[in-house]
Amino acid sequence: MARFVIDPNRVNFDISRSGKEYNLRVLQRAQVIFTNLLNLLPSNYISAVAGPNYTLELKAIAVELAKIELALEDVDFDRDFEHTRSEFLQSIIGYLLFMNGRIPPLDYNDEEFRRFFISLIKIYFQGSIPKSIHDAVALFFTQEFKVLENFLLTRSGASGLDISDEFGFQIDIFTNNVFPTDLFSLDSALRIILDLIRPAHTLFRIRFIFQDFYVPNQPTGTVLDSMRWRMAAYYYEDFRVYCGGIRDRDRLGHKVNQSVTNESHSADF
C-alpha cells in the first residue's frame, strides 16, 4: 500500500509490533525502501539482491525505516476518530467528553465502544437541545420512549407539576414486557451521558413504565368477570386466649396474689 493510506484488508490495528500481519507489512514496505536505496547507488554497485555486504547493510536500514514509517502512519491515523486504535480511544476521545474519568459502565468490545464514542461526539456538538437528549436515550434503549419537558406539561394543567418544576424534563421508557437484563447498568450509563448533554440548570427523572398486553377471552372476545370476597377478623381469636400466660401464676409458676376490691361479704354472716 502507498504511504499514509489505510489498507482496507488490514485486520490488526492495535499497538502490538508483532504478529504475522505486522511482519508481512514490514517486509513489503522494506522491499520498496530497499529498491529505492539501491537505485541511489552509483552504477558500479550492480547487485540487486541481498548478497554483498553493502546490500545487507541497506536491507537492515530498509527494515528499520519500514518500522518507523509504519509507526508514524499509525500515529497519523489516530487523529481520525474512525481509525483511532483501541488502546487510545479513551485517552484521545473519552478525555474530550468525560470528566473525572466517569466512563459509562458498558460491556462493549472495541468496535462497539468506538461507534458509541463517535455517536456521542455528534450528539454532544448538537448542543443541549431536546433532540440531543432524545438521541442520547436512543443510544441505550430500542424500546419506545418519550422525552417530556415539564414546562410544556404544566401548560396542560393536568400534569401534577407547578412552576417549581419548570426547569426539568422527564424520560418515560416503555418496556412492553421486554425487561433488559442489564437495566441498572443502562440506567447508570444514561445518567452519565445526560449530565454531559443536558442544560446545566435542569433536572431530570427517568421512569420505566411497564406495560402488559390484554388478550380477550376466546372465541367471542368478550370480558367474563366474576367476584369473590372473604371477610375475616383475626382479633376474634385473641379474645378467646389469655395472653398473660398461665392465669394466677407468675413466670416461675408460683401463685400470685390477686387484688380484690369492692367484694361484698355480707352473706358470710
Image (tube, rainbow, N blue to C red):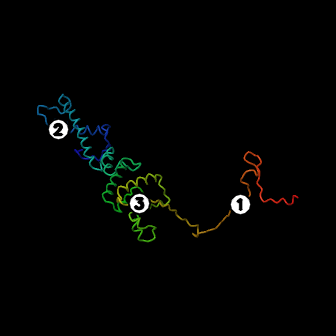
Q: Amino acid at mark 1?
A: Tyr
As measured in the structure, the alpha-carbon distance from the residue carrying label 3 to the one carrying label 2 is 64 Å
Q: Nearer the viewer, mark 3 or mark 1?
A: 1
Q: Does residue 168 sit above or below 107 in this rendering?
A: below
Q: Amino acid at mark 3?
A: Phe
Q: Position of residue 70 (x, y in %)?
A: 25, 41
Q: Which type of secondary structure does the marked residue at label 1 adopt?
A: helix
Question: For mark 2, what is the residue?
Answer: 36
> Crowding at label 3, few (<14), some or many (≥20) Cα neighbours within 10 Å?
some
> Residue 104: horizontal and vertical position, in percent?
39, 50
Residue 74 shown left or right of residue 104 in the figure: left
Give the number of the disc on residue 130: none
Which of the two marks, 3 or 2, is nearer to us in this view? 3
Residue at 27% across, 40% down: 25
Amino acid residing under circle 2: Asn
* Quadrant of the image containing the C terminus: bottom right
Residue 204: give its label. Answer: 3
Local packing at callout 1 (Cα closer than 10 Å; few below 14, some 14-19, many 20+) is few
Q: In terms of sequence position, does the residue under pointer 3 or pointer 1 come before the other?
A: 3
Q: Any mark on residue 236, and which?
A: 1
The quadrant the N terminus occupies is: top left
- Front residue (pair 122, 261): 261
Q: CA distance from mark 3 to mark 1?
A: 50 Å
